[in-house]
Amino acid sequence: MNDSVKQSIEIKIEKQDDHRSAHHHPSSTSPAAGGGSQEATRQDSIERILQRKQKVYQLPRNQKLTKLSMYSACQGTECRCTGWKTPEENRHKDVEVDYCPNFKEECRNPNCKHSLEAHISHLGEINDDQINELLGAIVDVENLYMSMLRETDTDTKKVYAYLFRLLRQCILTRSQAVIRGPLGDPPFEHPSISKAVTNFVLHKYSHLNPGELETMTEVAKTFLHCLNHWNFEAPSARKDLSHEDASNYKINYTRWLVFCHVPAFCSSLRHFETSIVFGRNLLKAVYQYVYQQLLTKCKTERDRMPPEKRNMLAQLPKFLEALKHEVLNDDSQIWDPNFKPTASIMLQKSKRQHEAAVSSSSKKSSDPKRFKKDPECEDLPDEVVVRALKRINDSNYTSRTDVVFPPLQAPRDEAAKAEESRREIEFHVVGNSLTKPVTKESMLWLLGLHSVFAHQLPGMPREYISQLVFDPKHKTLALVKDGRPIGGICFRTFATQGFTEIVFCAVTSSEQVKGYGTHLMNHLKDYSTQRGIKHFLTYADEFAIGYFKKQGFSKDIKVSRHVYAGYIKEYEGATLMHCELHPSLIYTHFSSVIRKQKEILKELIAQRQQEVQKVHPGLTCFKEGLRSIPIESIPGLREVGWRPQFRTQRTSRPLEESADPDKLANSLSGVLQSVRQHSSAWPFLKPVNPAEVPDYYDHIKYPMDLKTMGERLKNKYYVSRRLFMADMARIFTNCRLYNSPETEYFRCANTLERYFQTKMKEIGLWDK
C-alpha cells in the first residue's frame, strides 16, 4: 500500500479513536463486526458508513479530486508513483474536513515530485456521478483496511486483505469489482436454505388452520432474517469439527465473508443473502450454535417484545427443535431439489381455500357436495383468435356486444398519439452540459421549459427551477409543438441506484386535458426501461397525487429506503410516490394493446353467444319409458362449456388422510410393527432372495415386503392410508400368484391378511 493511502486511513483511525465511546469493538466503524454483534449494532454501522459517504459526496469538486488523487497513479512520463502524497507540513490534515491543497503542490514521494494536478489530469472528463462512485469505493477500502488492522483471526484478516486489494485495484483502473477464483459463483448449493425452510413449513405445518399456519410462516421468516444477519464463528473457533468438516466450513465461511457479510457494509461489492446462496452444508455446520443462541434470546427478550409478536416468539423453540431434526437427517425430504407438496398437503390446502371461500360468500353451506372445483383454464386455439382479430380489423365491423358491453372510452393518450403520428408534436430529451457543446435549439427549449414550470408550479421559486433545469445532472423530456415546448418532465437518473427521480412535471394550461401528460410519462417510461432503469420516485404535492396515481404510481414504496435516502431531495408537505417499470412493456403502445385485447375478447364472447343461442329439439325418450339418461347426452350441453364434475368423497367414510401427517405415520407404524411380530409374517419380512428362488422375479413384476414398507414409512412415503394398504395387499397378492393354495406360504398370506385388516379396523382406518 502506498504511503498516501496509509496516511489517509491513519487520519480516519485517529479521528474515530478520539470520538469513540467505551465500546472498543470495531463493529461500530467497520464491516468486520465480530460474531454475535446485535442487529442494532450492525444497522448502526451501515448507517454510519452511509452518512460518511454522503458527507464525502457533498464535498467541493476540488476536495473530491484531491481525495481521488491519493488513490490515482501519477500521469507523468515513466513515473511509477501510485498515489499523490501530502506534503510533510500537511500530512496530518484531513481532506474531508479542513484541507484543500493547491493543485500545484508537489507530491511528497521523492521519486515523483510531480504536482497534484499530474495525479488527476485523467479525471477531468468524468462526471459527478462517476466521481461519487469512486469515492464510495474509497470509503469502502478505508473501512476494510481498518477492519483488517483490528481483526485478530488470521483467516478473516486474509479475506479482508484480499477484498482490500481488489477494491484498491478497481479504483486505480476505474472498473467494477468482480470476484473470480476458486470460491466459485453464488449460489453454492441447491436447494437453498430459504427453499428448504419453505419446504419444511409446507411439510410440517400445512395441516394447521390458517391462523396457526400464518404464525409458523412468520416464525420461519424470523429465522431466515436472523440467519441472513448472523455473524458466524471463524474457522479457528470451531474446534469441534473433524478435519473434513473443518475444511468445508472454512470454504463456506470464506464465501460468506466475501459475498454476504462484507458486501452488507461495502456497497462496492455485490451483496447476496446467506439463506439464498447457501444450503444444507452451511446450515448443518452452524445450526447447533445458532439454535442455542436463538433459544437464549427467546428467553431473555420475550418480555421486551410487543404483545402481537410474543405468540410468534413463543413458537420459535418448537420450530427450531423440529427443524433441527430435518437438518441433521440425511434423508429429509425438505432438501430434495424436486420436493413437491404431498397429496395430504394439497388436500389440506384445498380444504382451507374452500373454507375461506365459503366463509366469505353470502351463501354459506356446510354441505360438502356443493363444493365444486374450478375447471382448469384452457387456451383458445390460435385460429379462433386470428379469426376474431381479422373480423374486428374489418372496416365494416360493428360489434354485436355493444348492448351488453358499451363501447370503450378512448385512452387518455390516444389523441396525443395521433398528433405524434402526424408529426404535430414531438418528444425530445434535452439537458445542459459543461463538457460538451449544447445546441442553440436545446437551450431555447430549456428556457421555454423553465417558463412552463415556473408558470404551472407557482409554489416553486424560480431560482430553484433554474438550478435544476439547467443542472447538467438533470435532463428534461420536452413536449414540443409548433417548434416551442408546451410541457415536459424534468428528471434525474441515479444509474448506480437503479431509479429515476422526477422533479418537475407540467403542461402549459392552454394545452391540458388532451392526454399530453399521460403520453409524456409513457415516453419517459420507455426511455428509462431502454436504459435499464426499473423504478420512478417522486415527491408529489396534494394537487399532483391524482395525476401520478393514473400513471401507475403508488404510495406503497417497494424499494428499500437506503437505496434512495440521501440521493433525492425530500419536500416538506409532499408525498413520496413510487412506480415500478416492467422492462418487457412498451408503454407508449400499452393502451392500444389493451384496447385491442378487449375488442378481441368482446368478439370471442359474441361468437360464443351465437353458438350458445342455438335451439335444440326437446327430448322424447322419457315418453317412451326411459327413466334416466347420462347428463352428458343432453343436446347442446357440451357446446356451452359443460364439463363432468368429480364428486367429493363421502364424509361418512374414514378420512383418506389424517389431519396430521405425523399422527398418521405413528398409527401406520404401530400396525406395521404388529404385523411384523405375527407368527405368520416370517415369509414376508424381507425381499425374496433371487439366489434361493431364481424364477421369482420372472413372475412377480412388482415385489413388496415388510422391510421395504418399513423403509418407505421412515421416508414418509405413506401420505395416505390407501398407499399403505395397497403395498400390504401387494404382498399377499404376489404370494398367492406365485404359490399354490396348498402351500404354507399361501396359508400364511391368508392368515396375515385377516390380522392386518383387524388391526386397521381397530384404529379406524379400514372402510371395506
Image: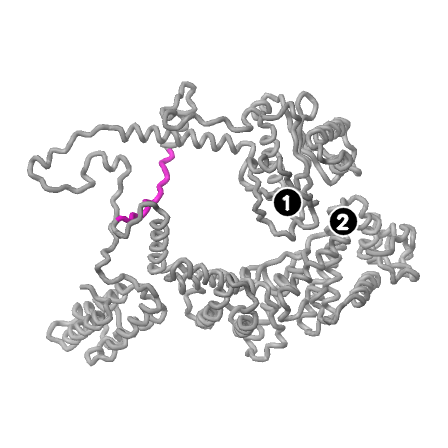
Tag shown at residue 413: none
Q: Residue 117: horizontal and vertical position, in percent?
A: 87, 50
Tell me what residue is drawn at x 60 percent, y 24 percent. Answer: 420
Tell me what residue is drawn at x 61 percent, y 39 percent. Answer: 530
Tell me what residue is drawn at x 32 percent, y 72 percent. Answer: 666
Q: Which residue is mark 2?
A: 131
> Farthest residue toward the top?
396
What stretch of residues is rendered in magenta? 370-382
Q: Secondary structure at mark 2?
A: helix
What distance separates the C-alpha of mark 1 from that of mark 2?
18 Å
Check contact, mark 1 vs mark 2: CB within 8 A. Answer: no
Q: Is residue 652 left or right of residue 334?
A: left
Q: Quadrant of the C terminus?
A: bottom left
Q: Say if the magenta span includes residue 375.
A: yes
Disc 2 residue type (three-letter): Ile
Q: Which residue is mark 1?
A: 499
* Rendered position, 58 above or below 243: above
* Rendered position, 641 above or below 744: above
Q: Residue 711: horizontal and vertical position, in percent?
A: 33, 72
Disc 2: CA contacts within 10 A as few (<14), some (14-19) or many (>=20):
some
The first of marks 1 and 2 along the sequence is: 2
Q: Secondary structure at mark 1?
A: strand
Q: Quadrant of the N terminus?
A: bottom right
Q: Residue 662: horizontal and vertical position, in percent?
A: 35, 68
